[in-house]
Amino acid sequence: MQLLFRLAILALFAIFQSCKDAAPKAVSNDQTTAQISLNSTIEDSLFNGRMQQIGNNFRSAVSNETKGKWLQEGIELSGLDGKESFKDVFVKELLKLNPAHPHAADYLWYLAERLREMGSVENASLIYMGFKHRFSSDPRSKEAGKYILSEQKDIHKYIKGRFKKLKDIQQEDTKEHENFEQLIEAFALAFPYDAACPGFLISMAEVCGKAGNISGMVANFDWVYQYYPKSKEAPMALFLKGFYFENHFDKKAEAADVYQLFLKKYPAHSLTKDVSHLIKDLKISSGN
């Protein structure tokens, strides 16, 4: 009986000891998980900070060469799993800045694949079409043909049809506006040398402006002004940017700045006299 009692005590002691030994391990695992989470948060914060810094450096850079270097760095740093959205932005901006970039084919292919993976068949088709058109000797050109929609064969007619459909919509359809903006973006990235590009971008900017999408409006007007500076649409893009700031968003100071830039860039334009009057009116209304 005593032996059984002693054995029972030893068994209970062993169970107690094992439980005690296990407790620190559980805490240690929790601590490890928390540390990993903290490290991940710190890494994300550092990464986001660096991405923002690169973006600021790009915007403040004067030469296209320097802008391209910052964009290239952004692409390289964002080439990690889970960071694709950052890479998308930098790749698009680099293709806007320099459609003839040495890696333009790879970047355009990357965008086409990304869009297809995300289920954006319509926009992916446009990018694949542009790839096939611009890089016909690339081995991937044959594969690109498999993803091009037959209804986009006459791409200008297709886009004009979509634009008409958008204008015919009686009520504001935010989703339809977004879809059309993405379609125009895809077209401009795929066919940057197409003569219709600046006009399509201006139309899209006006759609954004009327919908109250300031950032979208500015982005499209700036795309024309910055990347098609010699086009006949560039002065109009700058003028309309100021016009929308003044009349749709009540941003008088911003409008005045844009109008002043217009006079500096296009002193002999047919709109110069009108813009000068608009600046005077803004000064009168602001009391300056």
Image: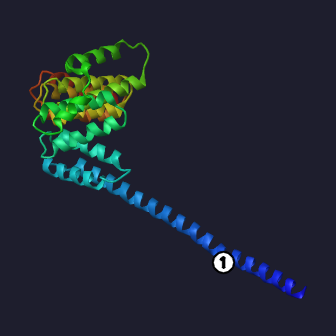
Which residue is rendered at x = 61% and y = 73% of the image?
Answer: 25
Quarter of the image where the N terminus is located = bottom right
Quarter of the image where the C terminus is located = top left
Which residue is rendered at x = 86% and y = 83% of the image?
Answer: 4
Q: Secondary structure at mark 1?
A: helix
The reply to whether residue 7 is in sight is yes
Nearest the eye: 16 or 118: 16
Left or right, 167 with respect to 71, comes to right
Percent position (x, y) of residue 285?
33, 27
Left or right, 249 with respect to 15, comes to left
Percent position (x, y) of residue 128?
22, 32
Percent position (x, y) of residue 35?
51, 67
The coloring applied to the image is rainbow
Q: Amino acid at mark 1?
A: Asp
Percent position (x, y) of residue 7?
81, 83
Q: Is residue 45 above or below residue 231?
A: below
Q: Residue furthest right?
A: 1
The reply to whether residue 261 is in sight is no
Which residue is rendered at x = 23% and y = 32% of the image?
Answer: 127
Left or right, 250 with respect to 105, comes to right
- All told, the count of numbered labels is 1
**Residue 150, image quadrant:** top left
Residue indicated by mark 1: 21
**Residue 117, image quadrant:** top left
Nearest the eye: 50 or 100: 100
Mark 1 Cα within 10 Å, few/some/many (few <14, many 20+)?
Answer: few
